[in-house]
Amino acid sequence: MTGPLSSGQTIGGRYVVQNYLDEGGMQFVYVAKDTVTDRVVALKTPKNPSAEKRFRRSAIVAAKVNHPNVAKTLDYVEEDGSTFLIEELIAGKDLKAALLTRTDYIDPYLVAKIFRHLAKGVAAAHHNGVVHRDLKPTNIMIVGEYNVTELKVTDFGIAKMAEAEMDEAVEGGDASLSASATALGAIPYMAPEAIDAPDTVGLPADVWSVGAIVLHILYGDYPYGSGLRAVGNITKNTPISTPKFVTSKSQFRPLAEEIIEIASRCLQLDATSRPTADQLVEMCDALCYTVSDRRVGTIKNYIHNAWGFIRTAGDDVFFHKDSVFGQLPKVNESVVFSCYDGGQAPRALPVLKLK
Amino acid sequence: MDLPERYAIDGDAMDGGMATVFKCHDRILERPVALKVMPRRFKTRRLNDELQALYTIRSKHVVQVFDVCVDNTSVGIVQEFVDGKDLFSTDIAPSSADDFLFILWQIASGISDIHAAGLIHRDIKPNNMKVDQEGILKIFDFGLAREDGPAAATVGFVGTVGFSAPEQYVAGTQFTQSIDIFAFGATALYFGTQSLCAELSAEPPSAFASNPFLSLPFTIPTDVADTLFACMAHLPSNRPKMSAVCQTIEKHLLFNRHRALVVLNGKPSYLDKDNTSVSLTFGSIAGVKIEYDGLLFKVTNVAGDVFVNNAAVAVGDALPGACVLTLGGPERRATQRAYVTFDLSNPEIIA
């Protein structure tokens, strides 16, 4: 197995390591069985042993937040000079792996849902005075892939550990930047004050990051670019313009414009001008979106170059070109879509082309 | 009990019904936790299967267990401390029908999650649920006084007077999930009226002469009142499923909050509570009028041939979530038919 632990090893007299799951910039993640409560949990341990003191601090910080949109901290163990954080195991993938692998962008309905749940999780943390500091797609867990049945923000407090590494990377320019996976992943969503004056970073920095993440998943592109170029664009607040496809269709334009409007309020150079997380939740609470199940299928045909059918495991589903968000899929290409009862065939909306 | 060094009792014992509950400080994670102490029968740190299942259920509305400690005589269950008021507290008495329904929806969602896992709570009552600082209602204190589970508890009456179903007073009855549904109805009535009525105080509870949910201090929709009343049916099989109760409440929580995006000739417009009707016409060929009544978008007038997703539409039909309206019959050429997309959405009800 990857990392310091092996399968079958018992931690804290209670957690039996089952398998290696993943690794973040700062830590290894394992699946373990809690023999006391008889459930499977996520067990995290820092990659850098010198970070251990801060690891406990981060566990305590994360443990203060108790909300359905935040991964729940269950326990913390120190044993033989090593430290372990035990968290609820989320049966899903991070947002990047779950939603930005087979698509570059997501339709406004799903973006609205993600925006709202993300804002709620961040607001719950802010109520406890907890700043995340490192919100990015890989720190957001998604259950149910394109159905997004659950969304949970994770790795609160870990950012403090990553700060030193990131400062170094930003100062060192492109070469050291690309050497630091942590910095590379975080920069596109970083608030200007996190770059200019990391000591002053407070709650509004998270609000900026939420805005940047939301624009990224709606646009299919980093709103400020990536790498060192992003640093300049962020500190001058010069985002890319909205890609044409986002607002070109009547069926998506009104909601897309609402989302862009709210996200833009989060992306203001002056941190005090941004909405608080509570104000952001209130704005997102009013967003109307559908939560119908998403299905996967392949395009069967196009008729009159306007509409056609999607082949699925069950019935064929009717779709119209106007209900496709972004690039039009070709015949036999895969799509993910919601569908509604129709007279003869169910109708799909929205339709997203999969890679 | 002898507590591990990790936990320090912090304050007086709380009323825990059949067990004692203490607020404790977890010295490792530096946070408050609730400790429920029960008599111990087995010499392991592991709980019996049903208690295990109840405590490991995944629901936003059920408290989570963190740890289990044992000494020679007791077992302590360390769980999430919910910082908030229980439903007996007048501080969270509902001030409007919406307040009332939103709390009931959360209780119903929690019980629905418990039932979906094939489990029974056994002690649903106002003081076994709290609303936390985030406004989220959490259910706790499953009705199990001992670590060996409920089997022994079916001898004689176990439950809370005022919230127990009639069948719980009959010795030897095999309890089902419907006792939670009765208790939910009784809890809803207590929460709505802020008092326990004579019918529910009776042992066993007596039948109501009329539906008490029709005379709450605020008015709730009739179908919700009917569903809540049905929860307290004396015959368990007449009580609705908890998931159905959730759906009925949810429908009304969305009252006047739907939005329909109507696109004709590439021009989008919205139908909502402020803009409740639209008439769509296509020359002299066909026309249709759609009106929003706060719950549904209904067809109120049809002229000529109008189709919804290729099925002919009639006055009184409600439009589905996303559809295409076609003005003009299929015998016409494409240029003589007009297409209107109609997409319905609403805020998601989440706690």
Image (tube, helix red, strand yellow):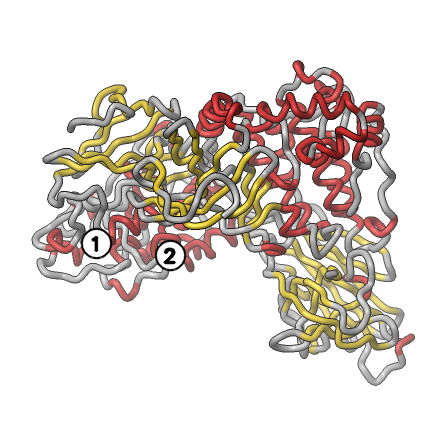
Quarter of the image holding residue A79?
top left
Quadrant showing the N terminus of chain B:
top left
Any part of residue A230 in sight: yes
The nearer-to-camera label among 2 and 1 is 2
Considering only order in the chain, which callout, 1 or 2, is on the residue closer to the N terminus? 1
Residue type at mark 2 is Met
Residue at image coords 57%, 49%: A93
Residue at image coords 81%, 30%: A174
Residue A248 in the image: x percent, y percent?
Answer: 86, 52
Residue B314 in the image: x percent, y percent?
Answer: 67, 74
Residue at image coords 84%, 29%: A233
Identify the residue at the far bottom of this view.
B331
Kindly state the secondary structure of the residue where label 1 is placed.
loop
Mark 1 lies on residue: B165
Residue B324 in the image: x percent, y percent?
Answer: 74, 68
Q: The numbered mark 2 sits on a residue in which chain?
A: B
Kindly state the secondary structure of the residue where label 2 is placed.
helix
Q: The numbered mark 1 sits on a residue in which chain?
A: B
Residue type at mark 1 is Ala
Residue at image coords 44%, 40%: A43
Quarter of the image holding residue A179?
top right
Mark 2 lies on residue: B242
Any part of residue B163 in sight: no
Apparent side of residue A74 relative to residue B326 in the rendered image (left or right): left
Apparent side of residue A332 relative to residue B232 in the rendered image (left or right): right
Q: Residues within 10 Å of mark 2 (few under 14, many from 20)?
A: many
What count of labels does the image hold?
2
Apparent side of residue B196 relative to residue A123 in the rendered image (left or right): left
